[in-house]
Image (spheres, rainbow, N blue to C red):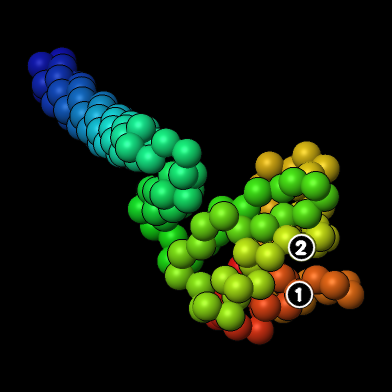
Amino acid sequence: MALASRGWDMASTQDDTIAELQRANVALQLKFETSQAERDAALAREAALADVLNIINSSPGDPDPVFEAILEKAHLLCRADLGALYVYEDGAFRALATRGFPESYVVVARRPFPPTVLYQRLLDGERYIHVLDVRTEELQPGQEIARALRDSTGVRT
């Protein structure tokens, strides 16, 4: 009776050990895959930075290709369909580069415009702003850029 009892304990212990090893293997596999994804993202960022630096070196005195390259690389890294790179100077924003927007929006975005409520939040220190539906944002007089975005694109968030 004692032998049967010990045999059962050994089988149970072996099963527990195998299960524990399988869990550890899954955890290590997950860590490995996460590390690979982080490495790939870091390499993509480094390649994008190298491309932008090459464009800076090849276009002295002309910043437009640099802004276009920065925006292009950001779109590739983020898998974005459209976007713009703005500068804030003399109390107004204006687009330096755009991608994926209709020309009617680009024309408005390239002219200086006062900060919208959302842009003011950035100026006040918020790093990121997520808008669930741009159509519900309150538009103030003189905010043609927000109106153009809302009316000429399918962008909602």
What numbered label is drawn on residue 144?
Answer: 1
x 35%, y 32%: residue = 57
Q: Is residue 63 above or below residue 154?
A: above
Q: State left or right for residue 103 relative to residue 50.
A: right
User: Label 2's element?
Assistant: loop
The picture places residue 15, in percent across and down from the top left corner, at 18, 29
Q: Is residue 104 above or below residue 76?
A: below
Query: Which residue is label 2 attached to?
Result: 113
The picture places residue 66, in percent across and down from the top left corner, at 44, 44
User: Label 1's element?
Assistant: helix
x 52%, y 78%: residue = 103
Q: Are marks 1 and 2 in contact (CB under 8 Å)?
A: yes
Q: How dense is the environment of label 2, judged by Cα within 10 Å: few (below 14), some, or many (20 and up)?
A: some
Residue 98 visible to an observer of this rendering:
yes
Quadrant location of the C terminus?
A: bottom right
Viewer-proximal residue among 139 and 52:
52
